[in-house]
Image (spheres, rainbow, N blue to C red):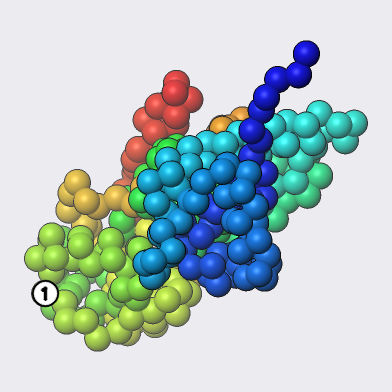
Amino acid sequence: MRNSFVGVDLRALQAFVAVCETRSMTEAARVLGVTQSAVSQLVAALEREQGVALFDREFRPVRPNAAGRILFDRAGALLEHAQAVSHDVRTATSEGVPSLRIGCVDSFAGSVGPHLVQRLSGRMKTLSMWSGLTPTLSEQLTNRELDLAICTEATLDPRRVELRPLFSETFIAVAPRRFSGKRAPESFHEVLRELPLLRYTGRSLIGQQVERLIRHMNFNAPNRYEFDDTDPLLSLVGSGFGCAITSPLCLWQSRAHLADIAVVPLATTRIGHRHFYILTRQAEWSSMAEAVARESVAVTRDVIAPGLLAALPGAPPHLFDAYAAAFAAQSAA
């Protein structure tokens, strides 16, 4: 007995989704790494397969019509399921160990990253770790260039991307080492009367988050110096040139400068934390994300927090205030 069945070509469906998301055949071809002609042919084949037009071709940029919108709403789940099936099949082979591509924000890659690679090394055949800014990593995840991303903010479509809380870290104010001992100030305001505030660039999320904290705390600090990286920022703090607000992971990433800096008291506030999340595509890599979360939390608890507290006696005792609660919530989910 034969059943009538209208199938869906997954390559054509992927091309259709790319066109919907980019609003351009040319841009969709760039994202997929194929020619524009190939994208056009795949979309045309999908329309023939379904027996309906999927795009309103009278408008520019291109946009799906009513039938196309229905397909687009369901296409993500179809592609995610197909990817999950493919992953399960591959990992069920005799090799049994998959390859994994992780993307991390720079401070995580430079602090937790090396320990994480060592702890995961026996669980997979190959492991790639990339670093970059949160918007870039999020885009790479949705474009399937990454399997898992560790970011400090996520605004992606929850129907396609699963977000797990990882941990939170407390922002820390630092000044040159001479601001320690008997000369230790009672607050960061005192340091700012004497030294300029060195900032992270506003194009980074940590720069934007620190800026919100600066405004919230009413610090009088003209914006004169900005840096992409923690190394030059802490180097200048250690030399006595200025002061800064940074985070535990950034400090650990640039720990060569810890001997030259001192922690300055910073009032506790609800926006005085930076939150980390693990992002995966829906129905993919769930068990690996749990393993990454477990090992990452262990690194912050057993390696980074004790190391920073030993090197910086004035640091707040709870550097990773929310990591226990975040991990407990993630584990119970």
Q: Residues within 10 Å of mark 1 (few under 14, many from 20)?
A: few
Q: Which residue is mark 1?
A: 220
Q: Nearer the viewer, residue 201 or 39?
A: 39
Question: Against 197, is 304 above or below?
Answer: above
Q: Is residue 328 above or below residue 168?
A: above
Q: Position of residue 221 (x, y in %)?
A: 16, 77
Which residue corresponds to the image point at 66% horizontal and 69% vertical from the top-left?
A: 37
Q: Does residue 304 appear to the left or right of 219 in the view shown?
A: right
Tell me which amino acid carries mark 1: Asn
Q: Quadrant of residue 303?
A: top right
Q: Residue at x 17, y 81 (%)?
A: 222
Would you say 90 lies left or right of 63 here? right
Q: Quadrant of the C terminus?
A: top left
Q: Quadrant of the N terminus?
A: top right
Residue at (22% x, 57% y) in the render: 265
Can you give x and y, in whole percent of width and height, for residue 326 in the image? Answer: 39, 33
Height in image: 271 above or below 200? above
Residue 189: image location, x then y, percent: 13, 68
Q: Quadrant of residue 248?
A: bottom left
Residue 197 shows up from this direction: yes
Q: Residue at x 44, y 64 (%)?
A: 57
One can see residue 252 in this view = no
